[in-house]
Image: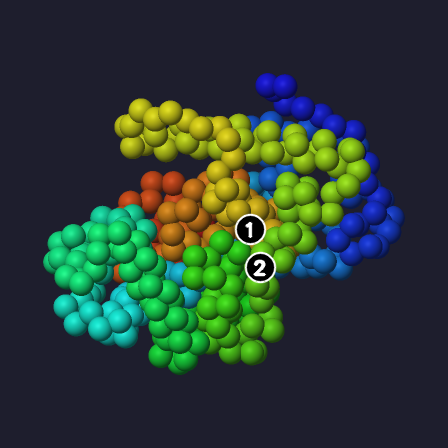
Amino acid sequence: MTGACSILHPISFCRATGTQLSRSPLPSILSFSSSSPSLRNFVDPCKKLHPSRTTHCSSSSGLSGSNSNAKDLAVLLEVEGVLVDIYRLGNCQAFNSAFQKLGLDCANWTEPIYLDLSRKAGGDEERMLVLFFNRIGWPTSLPTSEKEKFMKSVLREKKNALEEFVTTKSLPLRPGVENFIDDALRENIPVVILIAYSKIGDKMARSIIEKLGHERTSKINVVGKEEVEGSFYGQLVLGKGVSSSLDEQLAKEVKRAASVEKQRVAKEVASLLKLSVDINTSPSERLEKIVATLRAGAEYGGLPVHQCVLIAGSQSGVLGADNIGMPCVVLRSSFTSSAEFPLANAVMDGFGGADLTISKLCHKRWS
């Protein structure tokens, strides 16, 4: 099927909660295509799992860009680069700790060295080590056949050092992030923190979130792997809890539509970069995980994706948001200080003042 598709799919039972719904939460005919917003704007009606809230900004303009008087908004936050500048304050120090523990006195990364290696390696830490030791020379006692094992030992010690650094109070939150969250909560704006696709892993991401304090964390939603799998979108597309033939067919059609959407995004990116690329329409595991997390985040925020805004610290987050039509603002970190984000609505340097504020999001001032 190449065009839009329609599926009869009445549902009267919420699988996530086991509760009977008085009416079918889906329209009797669900239609979607690569250009149709019907699925991307759908919010799970299973109230017990994703309680819908009525939120209000004090501004006169909403994010949806419609003529409606509704001023609903939810804020989704990444962890790396947004809650903390983990690239500058965490990773570099963790690598140096690993070098010291392994007795590599010749290796000591200053911030400029770390950032240069990270940019050249595209953030691939194993490649960063290869570039560095190719430049200064590998340990003389290390056989060529042992290089891969050596790098794995460095990365293992680096991970342990980073985890220790993150779980202590040594790693500070980004300036202004606490006030930003407080302002959102004061305006009754749902705040959702996304960790399901965090590169540092669930444990470290949650340790960073705990730095916000219990009073704040008790009022926000954290979306990890479990929350994604339990979301309405996760159950359909990831196959969690889907058993009936109709549900399975719907999941296949959603995946097909997502594949077409990814092809469109790839073409747009290639055009922006003036590159000729071979487009692979098979699902990207990384992008699929990000999209599922963003959609789950919107569900937990109680709003459709176009009324949520992602505060991203990574290029991958921006691509995921663009894929589903979610507004996105990039917060620069040491790692992305000179990067370009053509698909983002705005790029800002930090929280508060002339940079990112709740007031700007409410007024849709991308500046």
Secondary-structure class at tag 1: helix
Q: Is the Cβ of the residue at disc 2 closer than 8 Å to that at disc 1?
A: yes
Amino acid type at mark 2: Val
Q: Residue at x 75, y 37 (%)?
A: 247
Residue 294 x, y percent position in the rendering: 54, 49
Q: Residues within 10 Å of mark 2 (few under 14, many from 20)?
A: many
Residue to which mark 2 is pinned: 223
Observer-nearest of 165 and 345: 165
| Relative height, residue 36 to residue 320 (above, below) | above
Marker disc for residue 193:
none
| Relative height, residue 287 to residue 110 (above, below) | above
Q: Residue at x 82, y 55 (%)?
A: 18
Residue to which mark 1 is pinned: 293
Residue 146 x, y percent position in the rendering: 27, 56
Observer-nearest of 168 and 135: 135
Residue 344 x, y percent position in the rendering: 39, 45
Secondary-structure class at tag 2: strand
Would residue 112 appear left or right of 240 to someone viewing this image?
left
Amino acid type at mark 1: Thr
